């Protein structure tokens, strides 16, 4: 059975019609509705912005971080959970947590807005095209 993106009443009518025609025996079928996850453009923008924190040497408590760590910190700031897991050698820990690919469009928008806000507070310079993309 196909996957549908419903944006209009006509799209919704097509889904309903297809469901009404779908066989119910012997195994039936599954239907699920979910909100759309973040766009590729949002994802690209997020990584571009996070890279600026890394490239411009932004710090927390005097320590610099890679863009992946900044992403984890921003997700945490928005209330998404993460866990600290030990490395295989037991010498240190790393964060494992919520994946930005699971964010819905409004959640990703909030994340990007938070990144811009924090960047402004820390003096991070973003390119003009990045600011327009938000």
Image (cartoon, grey):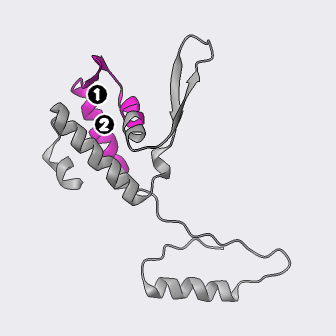
Q: Which residue is drawn at 63% across and 17% down?
A: 88
Q: What element carries label 2?
A: helix
Crowd rating for badge 2 (residues with CA inside 10 Å; few <14, some 14–19, many 20+): many
Query: Number of numbered discs present?
Result: 2
Image location (x, y in percent) of residue 102: 50, 51
Q: In this view, does 130 lie to the left or right of 111?
A: left
Q: Which residue is drawn at 13% across and 47% down?
A: 128
Please, what is the dominant secondary structure of the magenta stretch?
helix
- Expressed as whole percent of the image width and height from the top left, the position of residue 54 reads 28, 28
Depicted 101 relative to depicted 94: above or below: below
Q: Which of 66 and 92 is in front in this view?
A: 92
Q: In which quarter of the image is residue 74?
A: top left
> Which residue in the structure is indicated by mark 2?
50
**Which quadrant of the figure has residue 116?**
top left
- The x, y position of residue 64, in whole percent, is 30, 20
Question: Above or below — where is 26 with respect to 55?
Answer: below
Element class at badge 1: helix
Based on the picture, tell me whether residue 49 belongs to the magenta stretch: yes
Q: In this view, does 93 lie to the left or right of 113?
A: right
Q: Which residue is rendered at x = 25% and y = 27% of the image?
A: 55
Is 132 rendered above or below residue 63? below
Q: Residue 54 carries which label?
A: 1
Q: Which region shows up in magenta?
A: 43-72
Binning the other alpha carbons within 10 Å of mark 1 as few (below 14), some (14 to 19) or many (20 upward) gives: some
Quarter that holds the N terminus:
bottom right
Q: Can residue 102 be seen in this view?
A: yes
Mark seen at residue 28: none
**Going by the image, does 95 lie left or right of 26?**
left
The quadrant the C terminus occupies is bottom left
Mark 2 and mark 1 residues within 8 Å of each other at the beta carbon: yes
């Amino acid at each position: 059975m196909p996957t549908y993106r419903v944006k209009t009443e006509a799209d919704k009518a097509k889904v309903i019609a297809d469901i009404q025609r779908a066989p119910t025996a012997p195994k039936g079928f599954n239907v699920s509705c979910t909100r759309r996850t973040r766009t590729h453009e949002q994802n690209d923008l997020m990584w571009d912005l996070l890279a600026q924190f890394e490239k411009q040497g932004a710090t927390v408590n005097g320590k610099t971080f890679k863009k992946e760590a900044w992403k984890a910190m921003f997700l945490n700031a928005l209330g998404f959970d993460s866990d600290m897991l030990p490395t295989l050698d037991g010498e240190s820990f790393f964060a494992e947590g919520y994946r930005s690919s699971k964010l819905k469009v409004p959640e990703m928008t909030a994340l990007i807005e938070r990144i811009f806000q924090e960047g402004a507070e820390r003096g991070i310079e973003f390119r003009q095209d990045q600011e327009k993309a938000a």
